[in-house]
Amino acid sequence: MIRFAVFFVLAYSMCAAFVPSPAQAGIFEFFFGKAKDDGPDPLQTGVAPFAYDPSKPAEALKSLPESTVPLNLPHRSPAHLVEWVTTASSEVLTFEKSDYRAEIKDRKDRFDSNGLREYVAFLQERNIIKILEDGTFQVRSFVEEPPLLLNEGVVDGRYHWLYELPMMVSYMDRNMKTYKKADAVNQHIILKVQIGRSADGSGIDGLKIEHFSGRADTQEKK
């Protein structure tokens, strides 16, 4: 069994959230409905199940030697693949710069053409792009539990993996001066992410996101 015992302080010491003004709260209620109280969250406690800091990309993954394993076989260990999909999912749903379009462009190497289309469509359908265009908020995202492998196997001569991941997407005031006594507006989302070996070996570790979709997680958080 893969152990997920990851602790982080630095990733959250610079990050908390805000108490939204009535106007700000109205934006989120319009898009997402009234936020429910889910109890303590990682942005407040400094503790979360997965420690991923999008400001520090996992360069170690990029430095692995090119695999010579045939495309119809898995070329990375289960632990490495879970790390890959966890890192990628958190990274592509985090927006901290003023130009979100540039951030999307910088992440194109994570996706094949279909995966990129589905990713952009997801951002639009979940109203994340509308929030970013407002310019008031930045977005940080975290995987809340170990990704669940739903399926794996060979399709068209290449190996693929399908994962389900519970995510927390947090919206914070971009101009906030202090992070003390603050509270984030959070969304809980269940992602389905299919990754596969790229035919030409491109992408980080020769992997690409091929399908990207999600839905609201309506289960009560404890």
Image: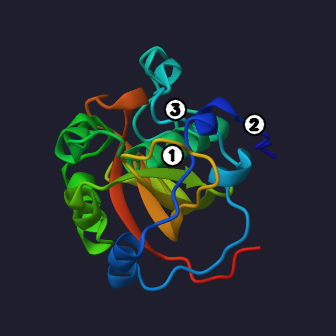
Q: Residues within 10 Å of mark 2 (few under 14, many from 20)?
A: some
> Gap in Å between the C-alphas at discs 3 and 2?
28 Å
Is residue 207 depicted above or below 214 in this figure? above
| Nearer-the-camera pick, 204 or 72 | 204
Residue at horizontal 57 percent and vertical 38 percent from the top: 52
Residue at horizontal 23 percent and vertical 66 percent from the top: 130
Contact flag, marks 2 and 1 (Cβ < 8 Å): no
Could one spot residue 109 in this view of the protein?
A: yes
Residue tagged 1:
85
> Gap in Å between the C-alphas at discs 3 and 1?
15 Å
Q: Mark 1 belongs to which amino acid?
A: Val
Residue at horizontal 64 percent and vertical 39 percent from the top: 51
Mark 1 secondary-structure assignment: helix
Contact flag, marks 3 and 1 (Cβ < 8 Å): no
Q: Earlier in the sequence, mark 2 or mark 1?
A: 2
Q: Residues within 10 Å of mark 3 (few under 14, many from 20)?
A: some
Residue at horizontal 46 percent and vertical 66 percent from the top: 20
Q: Earlier in the sequence, mark 3 or mark 1?
A: 3
Query: What x and y, as percent, mark residue 192?
Result: 46, 65
Query: What x and y, as percent, mark residue 1?
Result: 82, 46
Residue tagged 2:
7
Query: What x and y, as percent, mark residue 123?
Result: 29, 63
Is residue 54 depicted above or below 124 in this figure? above
Q: Which-is-in-front pick, marks 2 and 1?
A: 2
Picture quadrant of residue 46: top right
Q: Earlier in the sequence, mark 3 or mark 2?
A: 2
Mark 3 secondary-structure assignment: loop
Q: Which mark is residue 75?
A: 3
